Amino acid sequence: MEEIRKSRILIIGVTGYIGRHLVEASLSLGHPTFALVREATMANHPEKAHFVHGLKDSGVTILFGDLYDYESLVKAIKQVDVVFSLMGHHSVKQLEDQIYIVSAIKEAGNIKRFFPSEYGFDVDKVQILEPAKSMLGVKARVRKEIRMAGIPFTFVSSNFCSTYFLSRLCQVESTGFPDEEVRILGHGNTKVIFNSEKDIATYAIRAIDDPRTLNKVLYVRPAANHCSLNELVSLFEKKTNKTLKRIYIPEEEVLKKIQSSPEPLPFFYAIAHAGFIKGETCNFDIDPLVGVEATELYPDLKYSTLDEVLNQFM
Ligand SMILES: NC(=O)c1ccc[n+]([C@@H]2O[C@H](COP(=O)([O-])OP(=O)(O)OC[C@H]3O[C@@H](n4cnc5c(N)ncnc54)[C@H](OP(=O)(O)O)[C@@H]3O)[C@@H](O)[C@H]2O)c1
């Protein structure tokens, strides 16, 4: 019997935060995996070059190119079935310029699924303050361009990345666990959805050939990972046998921080305000015409719970 060929996946942005998880997931699920990498990055960033060499050793086909080298995009896209773009949110322009990938996919004409750079709130729904509003607005415009171009897509709305948020117990202004005091935005009872980066990537790769995710938002909402800041702090206290002093920051103060904190804090406070105060990761039901939920589609995938992710840092 003829073996069914696994879909070939191109990842643009393998050296980034989410891209590294996607390439791992693509390889571990056995897909022929291609990475579009910038030559200048290889020349100027030894750690990234080392990572890319490691990918090559693991079987990833490395293609040199750039978002701003249109021919390189078309050439790379013609070799695969599925494209992931992982342009980062540090540059609104970079997100906006995914439009070049949209054009290249349209020209190539062979792509059966495109996953643009998303991995957060549902950008067609979220109510969020500036400066995050502009960035998410760009993601929403890219969605529109993809729909208008008639390109088959899946938009992954995976809410808050658990490693990133939990490694600092969701403290906007610190990079590690709190020692004595913890700052809680709002009353701390708003539920937020967290997902491990590895799980997000695995769900996304699982979705590539799934007709149920075609032209849909793939929401990642694991039941065990809906958690409020108060619950999270209690879990942390139980694990560390410590009691933290909880300092509650009222919404008015968070709004002032969004307006007057030094860069890049306003962006992160705006994201935190939407998630931890307004509940924008889970304050709506999924419309089945628009989206599907990942743990319902793939119940066999054992996702990492918040508890397990926190344990990794203990
Ligand atoms: N929900 C969450 O908690 C969360 C957390 C993080 C990210 N995200 C989202 O995930 C998505 C990806 O973000 P990220 O943090 O993974 O991004 P990132 O770390 O900044 O990585 C960006 C990637 O894009 C590549 N790139 C940049 N400019 C390029 C160009 N001109 N041509 C080709 N490649 C280029 C970079 O390659 P070089 O190495 O060559 O620069 C890098 O691999 C974003 O939409 C972001 O908003 C969500």
Image: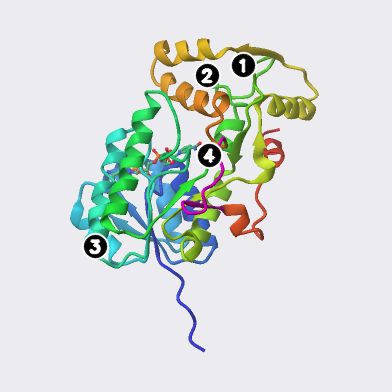
- Residue 37 location, x and y as percent? 32, 51
Residue type for callout 2: Glu
Dot 2 and dot 3 residues touching (CB under 8 Å): no
Residue at which label 4 appears: 159
Q: Within 10 angstroms of label 1, few (less than 14), some, or many (20 or more) residues?
A: many
**Of helix, strand and loop, which one carries label 1?**
strand
**Of helix, strand and loop, which one carries label 4?**
loop
**Of helix, strand and loop, which one carries label 2?**
loop
Horizontally, residue 110 falls left or right of residue 261, namely left
Residue at which label 2 appears: 173
Give the number of marks: 4
**Of helix, strand and loop, which one carries label 3?**
helix
- Distance from the alpha carbon under mark 1 to that under mark 4: 21 Å
Comparing labels 1 and 4, the label whose residue is closer to the camera:
4
Comparing labels 2 and 4, the label whose residue is closer to the camera:
4
Residue type for callout 1: Arg
Residue at which label 1 appears: 183
**The disc label shown at residue 218, or none:** none
Q: Give the main secondary structure of the magenta stretch.
A: loop
Point out the tag, 2 or 3, that comes first from the N-terminus. 3
- Residue 249 location, x and y as percent? 59, 12
- Distance from the alpha carbon under mark 2 to that under mark 4: 20 Å
Residue at which label 3 appears: 75
Dot 2 and dot 1 residues touching (CB under 8 Å): yes
Residue type for callout 3: Lys
Q: Which residues are magenta?
A: 283-293
Comparing labels 3 and 4, the label whose residue is closer to the camera:
4
Dot 3 and dot 1 residues touching (CB under 8 Å): no
- Distance from the alpha carbon under mark 2 to that under mark 1: 10 Å
- Distance from the alpha carbon under mark 2 to that under mark 3: 43 Å
The answer to whether residue 194 is above or below residue 291 is above
